[in-house]
Image (spheres, rainbow, N blue to C red):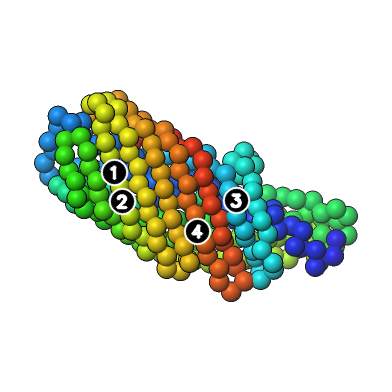
């Protein structure tokens, strides 16, 4: 394999770099809500772990090489997952709320080269971290419906390391990635059909380090009791970022499930 043919391996780089098993930003929308007959006073809090079965599509590029179109499925990405942590928190006081969502995913993949002369194997390790911190105000706050205006800042950090083993070039490695911050604004809503069943969702859009950053979710929820809710829905999130030879222009979308605890 000629060293210049590293561009052939870019789909593998992209797959690892963009592993979107996460559901970053959406959990504050999935937090369990008071049942209609409740009238809580003071602060209320929620914590929600979640799982996002997302696929990926878009363009990505490393080391200033031409961008490559990618379209891995959720099963492709999940098979390379090393570790993932996804959780969110939400706190409310009257019409005011603050929320955060933290997501960390680490993936790796090994690929053998066709001839193994210069390199026997290429290993790609990728770490993706996102964190959203925001606040909201309820412009509508009734017994069975709530509509918040929300805004916040989202930090992205993506790092990919490529290591070569065997052959003439074995033992070499190189990293590429970037960290940036985007500002987001949008709406978050909740509507209860009954004391048990409700729908919830949000839509956010913004920019900053990225040219465009957006996130949309809709979910159906069930209040198991006044403390625990289970939800299932669909989420789509996109970001368009490019800087100094590094490109991350992708859309992640797929079903999402979660359990939220209110206290």
The CA distance from mark 4 to mark 3 is 11 Å
Badge 4 or badge 1: first in the primary sequence: 1
Calculate the distance from the C-alpha at mark 4 to the C-alpha at mark 2.
18 Å
- Residue holding disc 1: 189
The residue singled out by tag 3 in the image is 57
Q: Cβ–Cβ below 8 Å for labels 1 and 2? A: yes
In depth, the one of 118 and 198 nearer the eye is 198
Q: Which residue is mark 4?
A: 239
Measure the C-alpha gap from mark 1 to mark 3.
28 Å
The numbered mark, 4 or 3, whose residue comes first in the sequence reads 3
Q: Position of residue 87 (x, y in %)?
A: 39, 45
The image quadrant that residue 217 belongs to is top left
Q: Position of residue 175 (x, y in %)?
A: 63, 66
Q: Could you tell which of marks 1 and 3 lies nearer the N-terminus?
A: 3
- Identify the residue under disc 2: 187
Residue 238 x, y percent position in the rendering = 49, 54
198 up-or-down from 106: above or below:
above
């Amino acid at each position: 394999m000629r060293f210049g043919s590293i561009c052939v391996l870019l789909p593998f780089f992209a797959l690892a770099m963009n592993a979107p098993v996460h559901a970053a930003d959406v959990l504050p929308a999935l937090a369990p809500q008071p049942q209609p007959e409740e009238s809580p006073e003071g602060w209320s809090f929620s914590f929600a772990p979640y799982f996002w079965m997302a696929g990926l599509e878009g363009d990505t590029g490393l080391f200033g090489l031409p961008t490559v179109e990618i379209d891995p499925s959720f099963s492709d990405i999940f098979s390379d997952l090393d570790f993932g942590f996804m959780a969110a928190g939400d706190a409310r006081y009257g019409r005011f709320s603050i929320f955060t969502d933290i997501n960390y995913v680490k993936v790796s993949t090994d690929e053998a080269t066709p001839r193994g002369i210069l390199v026997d194997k290429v290993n790609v390790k990728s770490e993706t971290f996102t964190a959203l911190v925001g606040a909201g105000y309820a412009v509508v706050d009734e017994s069975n419906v709530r509509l918040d205006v929300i805004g916040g800042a989202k930090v992205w950090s993506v790092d990919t390391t490529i290591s070569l083993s065997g052959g003439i070039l074995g033992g070499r490695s190189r990293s590429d990635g970037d960290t940036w911050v985007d500002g987001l604004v949008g709406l978050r809503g909740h509507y209860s059909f009954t004391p048990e069943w409700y729908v919830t969702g949000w839509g956010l859009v913004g920019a900053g380090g990225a040219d465009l950053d957006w996130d949309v979710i809709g979910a159906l929820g069930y209040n198991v009791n006044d403390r625990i809710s289970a939800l299932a829905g669909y989420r789509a999130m996109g970001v368009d970022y490019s800087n100094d030879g590094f490109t991350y222009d992708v859309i992640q979308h797929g079903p999402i499930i979660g359990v939220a605890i209110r206290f």
